[in-house]
Every structure is written in C-alpha cells, then in structure tokens.
C-alpha cells in the first residue's frame, strides 16, 4: 500500500531520476552541449526552466532562419526574376534553383536530370540571344567574320529584365566590297587562328565556357559607312546584295545602319533626303533581315578616306558663331558635334539644337512608318555626342590627344560658361564660375596635374562643385534629347551608347572619366545617375566593350574589366536593357573569349535567371 508523506506528495521508493530530452544537431552545437548522455537535475522547477530556455532558443533560431530565407527570396525575385510564390519556403527555392540548373522537379519532390538534347550546330557570327547556339558555331564565326568584314558590329537587344549584354557589335561590311588583308594585318599574327583551324579545334570554346542551352543573343552586323554618298544615294547595289547574302548564310539576325545627319539634312534646314537609305532598307527587307538604326548627329572622319561633316548650313552658322561647338581651355573649337550648351538656345536658324534633333527623328519615323509597322526596325540608337557616345569630346585626336592622355574639359564655349557662372552664383560662390586651371593638358597623366593627382583639387569643395556641374550637364543633355526621342519612337526600343573610358580607372581620381563627363572617382559612382535618366525614359544601354588594339602602356592604371562590370552592374541595378558593341575588330581567341564572357557570363544559370526562363533572351 502506498503512503503519503507529510506534505501530501506521493512517495515512491523505486522512482528513477528524470531525464530531459537532449537537443541534437544544430541546436546542440549552438548550445555547446556534449553528445554524451547525462542525467540532470531531477527538480521539477529546474526542468521547467531549462525547457523554457530551450523553447526561446528554438524561437530565435527559427526567426534567424526565416530572416535568411526572406532575404534569399527577395534577392531571387529582384535580381533573378524567379516566379516564387508569396509564402515560398526553402523547398520552393531548391526546386526553382534545380529547374534553372536543368533538373526536373515533380510536385512530390521527385528530382531527376533529363538527357541533354542534341543541338543543331550552325555558323554563328559572334554573340547572340534569340535561339540556342552552339559553341562551335561561335568558333567558326569569330575569325571568318573578321576576315570578311573589317568593320562589323555585334549586338544584343530587347531584354525584358536585366541581362549580361543585350547586344554586341563586331566587325562588318566594308564600304563596297570585302577588303583583302596584307601581311601586316593582325590576322596574320601568331595569336590568330585560321578559320579551318577554328572549326577543327572543336573544343576551343567548350573547354573554356560552355554556352549550350544559354539564352539566345541576336547578332547585328554593322554595315559600312561608305554605302551612302553625300547625295544620299546608294553606291553599289550589287555589292550590298552580295554582302547581305553572305550575312544571311551566316545566320546573322540583322544589320545595323548609321543614318548621318550630315547627309540627311545637307541641303538646308527642314530639307530631308532619305532616298539612299530607303533603297538600302528595301534590300535588307528582301533578305528578311532585321534592322537597327543609329541616328548620328556627329561628323564622321574615319581612316578610310570617307568624310561626313555636319550639315553645311550648320557649319556656316558655326563660322559666325563659333560657340555652337565644344571649346577647350585654350579656346580651340571641336567641330565634331554641337555643344550641349545650345540645346535650349535658338541659334540654328530659329531652332534650338534639341528641336533640330527632334525634327530629324520625327522625319525618320514618318518616312519609314511602313517598316516600323511591319516590324523590320527593331531598335533605334540616338547619338548624344562625339562618335555617337554620351560623352564630351575630351579625347579628340584632332586636338592632339593620344592614348592614354587624360583629356581636357570641354566647357569653355560662352553658353556653357554662362551656365557655370549662374550655377556658382546660386551656390553663393561666384569665384567658382570658371574651369580648373591646374588640370594639365590632353596628354598629361593624373600625377602631372594638381587637379587630378592623389589628394588633388578634384576632391576640394570647388573641385566637387565643378565636377558635379560638369557631369550634370551631360545628364541634362541626355534627359532633354531622350524625352523627345521617346515621343518620336513610342513603341521602339531606344539605345544610348555609353563609352568605355577605362584608362586611369585604377587611379584615385579616374581622371579620363572625369573629363569625359562621368563623375566616377574612387568614392563616387558616376554611372548610376546617368542610368536613372535612361530608366526614366525606358532607354537601353549600349556599352562599347573595350578592345585589345590599343597599346596599354600604363597597364597598372587601366582596367577595362573593372569598368565593364561597374557599368553593367549599375545598369542591372536600374533594370535596364543592356547591349554591347566591340570597339575594334576581333581576330584572336583571347578577345573572342572576352566578348563571350561579357555577353554570357561563365555561370550559365545566371543568364537564364536574368531572363526569367530558359527560352527568354535579348538581342545583340
């Protein structure tokens, strides 16, 4: 018979010591608990306290896990375009990642890899984004295209979400027919590969990067500048057809054509001539190739004895009013394009520069309305400066600049100077209404100038004010012209060309970028503000990918890869469509691989994630 003690609690002579459930795995590691089983205090009060503490620790661990999961989900949705459910858990994340990696995940969690489908290998001219292409097809193009087309362009386009590159530009068609390279041509260097050798070495690209199954990047080849003469006439129809037939056989997606203001409005204000371009576009249409157009509001003076100046009536105005052109500190005028200081000044026969550009855009849209309706024209590039790039003409060889000079500020025409004086007055610092006087010359290095050297005046109060004003003028120019461009081309993808000023990128001041208009020293992002304006107008970035043709004598200060990834990441951050154009013809394996890595990063899943699916792509 059982008996009770004096406090009423039951008394059992055979009771065993009470044992608490031992935490395991992560909980045990977090608590520092030994894996050896031990007996613990049998006191009911001690047991309850320990259990409560363990519950709190479990809650904290769960909150921490959920916080990590939440951040992972947010990142995948924002940057990877993953269609995850609102209350997704780690199973959903694992399933999504597995599917992006090529696995099949069924509803019950069964996961397996399907057999890889065979790819149709074809000739592929550079980088592209609209259907899967094989690495071997890339190999067969890179040198052959360079051999046949000394000035071609590789290009990506129309990405619905951030992508690596949306277009690439590679060497294309010559003026009238293919040029024959001499023995001194870089194609004969020991680093170059013959076309047959590329085809035979079928594993060249596969061994380095496997692009099978990645997003399709359409390739557009730039046609030669000399196809249209100054009277807006197509020079050699048979040669054009021959070249387009060859491009069609290479499975190029389309071509890129520059339309020159100096040809279109050469006869006088409001007198537009498009006849040569109409004939060229009709031939392109015959071959069922797509078309991207660049409206070039700058002069052309290439090394092939072709010269296309600004319209003669504009040049005549410039003789009486030299301040319509960009001007350096010594008062020298750059006639390659008009100063942004006259964007709002009625100095062009009663029109502002912005109105003149808009009238050309509107005339182009009206003239080729049928081709826009049919979908032949897939994109328009708006020229915003010298070489069509959004930059000041700070590196003009006409002014004596040679690589890797830092260039000079181009803000000394009277219109920009008036604006600078006004800006300094608003800041209450009227003596700041001038350009810097200790910034060297076109061919200086940063350390040779008091303004750009380490701890130089670029970081002073005045220096920061001037550089902010100088870069803001570039941004305002883009904002004004693009607001008009979006009116002219409402439903067409518009691109703006961004330069690759990568020399002196590793210096503190980034001097060359500063003179070009990009306020990008070590402690400041000079591209995000520009891209916010492009985002405002739904305009894409066309980045001029650095080439390898320059003599990189100051290698410790140049960094083309660093600049490239800063520009691309800034563009992705704004969700911009990104296109690419190689600055020089590509003749060797190293440059080919660099182009491919830029357009399609090594992580194949990255490209697919950025496009929201395996079959979604962009154009190049």
Image (spheres, helix red, strand yellow):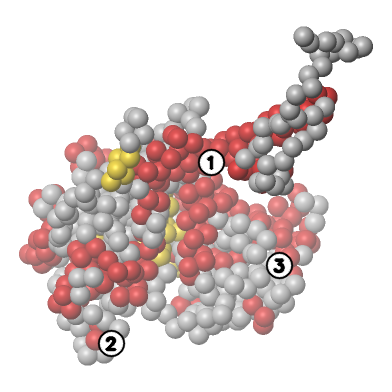
Q: Residues within 10 Å of mark 1 (few under 14, many from 20)?
A: some
Give the secondary structure at mark 1.
Answer: helix
Give the secondary structure at mark 3.
Answer: helix
Q: For the C terminus, give its image quadrant.
A: bottom left
Q: Which residue is mark 1?
A: 72
Which sits in the foreground, 459 or 188?
A: 188
Q: Earlier in the sequence, mark 1 or mark 2?
A: 1
Q: Residue at coordinates 40% horizontally, 46% vertically from top-left?
A: 610
Give the secondary structure at mark 2.
Answer: loop
Q: Residue at coordinates 35% horizontally, 75% vertically from top-left?
A: 590
Q: Note whether 544 is above or below 342 in the view shown.
A: below
Q: How many marks?
A: 3
Question: Are the residues flagged by discs 2 and 3 in contact, CB closer than 8 Å?
Answer: no
**Residue lying farthest to the right in this orientation:** 6
**x then y, percent, for residue 203:** 23, 70
Q: Which residue is mark 3?
A: 458
Q: Residues within 10 Å of mark 2 (few under 14, many from 20)?
A: few
**Residue lying farthest to the bottom in this orientation:** 183
Q: Note whether 151 is above or below 556 in the view shown.
A: above
Q: Which residue is mark 2?
A: 189
**x then y, percent, for residue 410:** 57, 67
Q: Residue at coordinates 46% horizontally, 78% vertically from top-left?
A: 397
Q: Residue at coordinates 35% horizontally, 73% vertically from top-left?
A: 591
């Amino acid at each position: 018979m059982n008996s009770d003690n004096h406090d009423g609690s039951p008394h059992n002579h055979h009771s065993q010591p009470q044992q608490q459930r031992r935490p395991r795995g992560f909980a045990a590691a977090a608590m520092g608990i030994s894996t050896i089983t031990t007996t613990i205090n049998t006191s009911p009060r001690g047991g309850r306290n320990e259990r409560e503490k363990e519950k709190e620790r479990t809650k904290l661990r769960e909150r921490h896990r959920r916080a990590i999961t939440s951040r992972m989900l947010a990142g995948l949705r924002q940057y990877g375009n993953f269609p995850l459910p609102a209350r997704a858990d780690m199973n959903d994340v694992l399933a999504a990642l597995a599917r992006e990696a090529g696995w099949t995940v069924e509803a019950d969690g069964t996961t397996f890899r399907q057999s890889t489908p065979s790819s149709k290998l074809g000739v592929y001219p550079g980088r592209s984004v609209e259907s899967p292409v094989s690495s071997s097809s890339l190999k067969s193009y890179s040198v052959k295209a360079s051999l046949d087309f000394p000035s071609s362009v590789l290009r990506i386009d129309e990405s619905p979400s951030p992508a690596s590159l949306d277009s690439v530009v590679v060497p294309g068609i010559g003026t009238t027919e293919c040029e024959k390279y001499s023995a001194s041509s870089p194609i004969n260097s020991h680093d170059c590969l013959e076309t047959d050798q590329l085809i035979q070495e079928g594993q060249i690209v596969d061994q380095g990067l496997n692009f099978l199954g990645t997003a399709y990047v359409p390739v557009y080849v730039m046609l030669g500048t000399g196809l249209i003469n100054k009277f807006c006439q197509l020079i050699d129809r048979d040669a054009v057809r021959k070249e387009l037939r060859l491009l069609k056989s290479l499975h190029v997606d389309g071509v890129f054509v520059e339309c020159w203001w100096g040809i279109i409005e050469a006869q006088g204000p409001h007198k537009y001539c498009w006849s040569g371009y109409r004939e060229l576009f009709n031939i392109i249409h015959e071959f069922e190739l797509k078309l991207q157009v660049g409206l070039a509001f700058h002069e052309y003076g290439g090394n092939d004895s072709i010269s296309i100046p600004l319209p003669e009536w504009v040049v005549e105005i410039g003789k009486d009013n030299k301040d319509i052109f960009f001007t350096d500190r010594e008062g020298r005028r750059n006639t390659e394009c008009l100063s942004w200081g006259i964007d709002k000044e009625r100095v062009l026969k009663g029109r502002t520069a912005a109105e003149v550009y808009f009238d050309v855009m509107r005339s182009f849209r009206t003239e080729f309305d049928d081709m826009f309706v049919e979908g032949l024209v897939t994109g328009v590039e708006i020229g915003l400066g010298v070489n069509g790039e959004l930059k000041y003409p700070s590196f003009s060889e006409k002014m004596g600049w040679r690589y890797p000079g830092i260039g000079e500020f181009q803000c000394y025409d009277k219109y920009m100077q008036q604006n600078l004086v006004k800006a300094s007055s608003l800041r209450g610092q009227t003596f700041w209404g001038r350009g810097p006087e200790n910034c060297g010359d076109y061919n200086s290095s940063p350390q040779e100038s008091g303004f750009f050297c380490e701890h130089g005046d670029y970081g002073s109060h005045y220096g920061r004010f001037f550089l902010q004003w100088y870069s803001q003028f570039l941004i305002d120019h883009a904002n004004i012209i693009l607001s008009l461009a979006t009116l002219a081309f409402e439903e067409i993808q518009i691109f703006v060309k961004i330069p690759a000023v990568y020399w002196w990128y590793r210096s503190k001041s980034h001097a060359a970028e500063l003179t070009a208009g990009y306020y990008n020293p070590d402690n400041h992002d000079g591209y995000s503000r520009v891209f916010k304006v492009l985002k405002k107008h739904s305009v894409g970035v066309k980045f001029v990918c650095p080439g390898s043709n320059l003599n990189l004598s100051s290698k410790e200060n140049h960094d083309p890869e660093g600049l490239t990834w800063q520009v691309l990441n800034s563009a992705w951050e704004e969700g911009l469509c990104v296109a690419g154009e190689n600055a020089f013809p590509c003749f060797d394996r190293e440059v080919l691989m660099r182009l491919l890595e830029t357009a399609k990063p090594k992580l194949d899943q990255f490209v697919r994630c950025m496009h929201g699916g395996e079959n979604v792509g962009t154009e190049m």
